[in-house]
Amino acid sequence: MSKLMKPFKLYLFFALSILIIACGKIEKPIKTITVKNPINVSRTFETIEIDGATLGLDQQINLDELAVRDNEGNYYMTQTIDLDGDKKADQILFQIDIAANESRIFELIHDASLVQKDSVSWCYSRFVPERTDDYAWENNRVAFRTFGPVAQKMIEENIKGGTLSSGIDAWLKRVDYPIINKWYANNDKEQGAYHKDSGEGLDNFHVGVSRGVGGIAKKIDSTYYFSKNFISWETISTGPIRTSFVLTYADWDAAGNTISEQKLISLDYGSNLSKFEISLNGVDTISAGLTLHEKTGQIKPNPEEGWLSHWESLDDSELGTGIVVPKKQMAGFEHYLTERKDESNLFAHIKVNNGKVIYYAGFGWKKSGQFDTKESWEKYLSDFSKRINNPLEIKMN
C-alpha cells in the first residue's frame, strides 16, 4: 500500500466515525419503551398512548418533535393530542401489531425531521351544519353519526326533515378511505344520495328513537327513559390514529330522576368499535343499547366476557352490532321487546363508577368484506374483550 493511500484511508475512517457519532447524537433515544402482550392472543392496530407528563422531559421539548422507532430501525406514524385546549400536545400515540405473549422494544427520539406524519385524517370527525346539525365520525372501517339541537327543534315545530334521537346511527362503508365529506356533499347535490350504494356503501340503518349502536337509556320500573339530541359539541382530535370529541346533552328526566350526560367518544384506526366515556349524574347504573329493528335478528349475550351481539339481515347483506363492557362493569343485560316503534333494544346494564361509565360499541357489515358470518363477528367481540381486559404492559426507561 502506498504512503499516500494510508493517510487517505485513515482520514476516511475518522471522517466516517465522526459522521456516525454525529448521526448517533441526532438519533439518540430519550426514552426506551418496552411493550409486552400478556395474553395468548395476537393483537393488531394496538394504540400505544403515552402522556407527556409521564416522560419527565424538558419543558422546551414539544411532543410533536418526538419520533418513534422499533429496535430494528423502523419508524412509526405518530399523532399528538391536545387534551386541555392549551395549544400544546399532551399525548403522543402510535400503533403496533404484537404477537401473542410477545415483548417489543421502541424508542422515543427527539428529532422532528424523523417524525412520520400522514396528511390524511383517516380517523375523522366533524360537526355537519349543512345537514341540519349532525355530528359524524369515521375511520378506515366504519362510520357513525348522531343528531343535534336544530334537528330536534324541527321535529318539535313540525318542520320536515328533523330528527329527534340521541341514538347512534351507523353509516355502512366498504372502502377504507374517508367518505363523510364526500357523502354529505353528494347529498347536497341530490337529496338522499347517501341512502344509495354507489360502490362505497350507504346509510340504510334506521335509528329513529332506538338506541342505534350504543346510545344510552335508564330503566325505571318497566320503562326506559333517554335524553334528546346533543346540545353542544367539541372536536378534540382528528388524525391518522384517533379522532375524539365531546357531546353534551341537556339534563333529562327518568321518572322524577334528573340525569346529566356528557359523552367523550373516540375511534381509533383499525377498530370497528367506538369508545364511549360518559360522565353521568343522578344514576348508579345506565343501559347501553343495540336496536333490534324488526326483531328478527339473532342475539348473543356473553356476560362472562362482558359483551352483547346482534346479527341481522339488512337489505341484500347482513350486519352485526355489538357492545363490549370492561371487566366486572356489566351489571346484567335485557332483551327488551315492545310493540312501541323503534323501542326494542338489546341492553347492557353498566355500573356507574365515580360518575362515569366506559364501554365500546360498533358494527361489522358483511358487504364490507370484514366479517362473513355471525360467528366471525362474535369472535371479534370476544377477542376485543380480551384485549381491553388485558391491556398491554408498558414500561419506560
Image (cartoon, rainbow, N blue to C red):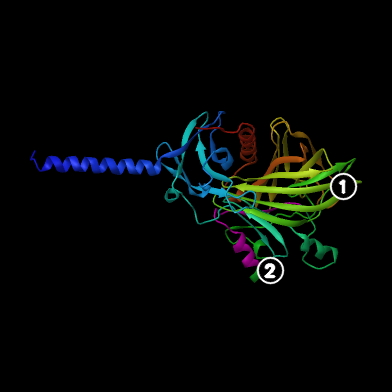
Relative depth, front residue between 296 and 282 = 282
Q: Residues within 10 Å of mark 1 (few under 14, many from 20)?
A: few
| Residues rendered magenta in the picture | 167-187
Relative depth, front residue between 254 and 292 = 254
Say what secondary structure mark 2 lies in. Answer: loop
Where 280 falls versus 233 (above or below)? above
- Residue 258 shows in the view: yes
Where does residue 112 sit, x and y in percent of width and height?
A: 45, 50
Relative depth, front residue between 118 and 172 = 118
Q: Which mark is residue 191?
A: 2
Q: Residues within 10 Å of mark 2 (few under 14, many from 20)?
A: few
Q: Which residue is mark 1?
A: 258
* Disc 1 from disc 2: Cα separation: 38 Å
Check the picture and name the quadrant holding the N terminus.
Answer: top left
Where does residue 385 sit, x and y in percent of width and height?
A: 65, 35
Say what secondary structure mark 1 lies in. Answer: strand
Tell me if 249 is positioned left or right of 187 in this view: right
Q: Residue at x 61, y 34 (%)?
A: 387
- What is the tally of numbered marks visible in this picture? 2
Q: Check disc 2 and give the amino acid type.
A: Gln
Where does residue 158 sit, x and y in percent of width and height?
A: 84, 67
Q: Can you name the residue that lies furthest to the right here?
A: 256
State which mark lies toward you, 1 or 2.
Answer: 1
The answer to whether marks 1 and 2 mark residues whose Cβ atoms lie closer than 8 Å is: no
Where does residue 48 sit, x and y in percent of width and height?
A: 55, 40
Q: Can you name the residue that lies furthest to the bottom here?
A: 189
Q: Which mark is residue 41?
A: none
Q: Check disc 1 and give the amino acid type.
A: Thr
Residue 366 inside the magenta-drawn segment = no
Tell me if 199 is positioned left or right of 6 in this view: right
- Residue 146 shows in the view: no
